[in-house]
């Protein structure tokens, strides 16, 4: 396992579409997932997509209990999601502050679908099929966007609601956001 370097907004690789995973339960896939977990944990992330560490595959991980970057968010189960598909279940949208390990030190007010179903595969190729709401739905959408070359600032409707954490939230501990 290794903590990998994170690509940051501006790197053209983050704007590319990721390729589907064709083989499951391989040593290479196990190593990628282990490195992603280590990297996400080292940065207090709620999720991480393979393109954020320079790997152009449709692999995301997410999950958290208590997280200093999102102190008010409900827990999200630890998940490896490969070749994901999102299905919105209604047109209801929620707006909330988002951050990203590839956009360090910043937050933006981002609209996301509030209720969706996602499908994909785990590390072993077993089907995952869940219906989710709230922060869980937000995290999945954020991470799957990375697989399409989309960073959260691209979804912000009003750029007056995008800025540096220390300016937007002056009482927040800077250690809470990388």
Image: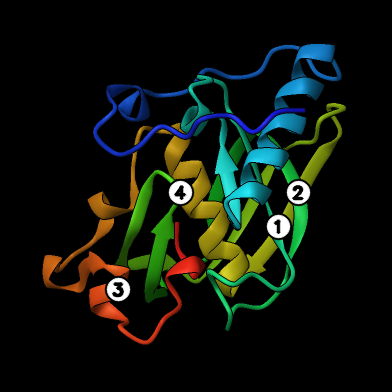
Percent across and percent down for residue 2 are 70, 28
- Label 2 CA crowd tier, 10 Å (few <14, some 14–19, many 20+): some
**Location of mark 1 (residue):** 63
Measure the C-alpha gap from mark 1 to mark 2: 6 Å
Q: Nearer the viewer, mark 4 or mark 2?
A: 4
What is the number of the mark on residue 101?
A: 4
Give the mark, 3 or 2, whose residue is nearer the N terminus: 2
Q: Is 57 above or below relative to 22? A: below
What is the number of the mark on residue 166?
A: 3
Q: Nearer the viewer, mark 1 or mark 4?
A: 4
Q: Nearer the viewer, mark 4 or mark 3?
A: 3
Asked if the residue at tag 2 contacts the one at tag 1, i.e. Cβ–Cβ closer than 8 Å, the answer is yes
Q: Point out the image quarter for the C terminus.
A: bottom left
Display colour scheme: rainbow
Percent across and percent down for residue 138 are 51, 63
What is the number of the mark on residue 79?
A: 2
């Amino acid at each position: 396992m290794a903590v990998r370097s994170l690509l940051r907004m501006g790197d053209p690789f983050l704007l590319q579409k990721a390729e589907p995973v064709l083989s499951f339960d391989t040593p290479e896939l196990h190593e990628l997932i282990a490195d992603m977990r280590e990297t996400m944990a080292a940065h207090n992330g709620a999720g991480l997509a393979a393109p954020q560490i320079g790997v152009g595959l449709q692999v995301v991980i997410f999950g958290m209990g208590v997280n200093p970057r999102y102190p008010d968010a409900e827990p999200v189960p630890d998940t490896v999601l490969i070749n994901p598909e999102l299905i919105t279940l209604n047109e209801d949208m929620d707006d909330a502050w988002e951050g990203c390990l590839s956009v360090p030190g910043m937050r933006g007010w981002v609209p996301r679908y509030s209720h969706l179903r996602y499908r994909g595969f785990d590390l072993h190729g077993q089907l995952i099929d869940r219906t989710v709401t709230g922060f869980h739905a937000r995290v999945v959408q954020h991470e799957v966007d990375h697989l399409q070359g989309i960073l959260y600032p691209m979804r912000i409707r009003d750029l007056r609601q995008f800025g540096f954490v220390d300016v937007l939230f002056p009482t927040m501990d800077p250690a809470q956001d990388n």
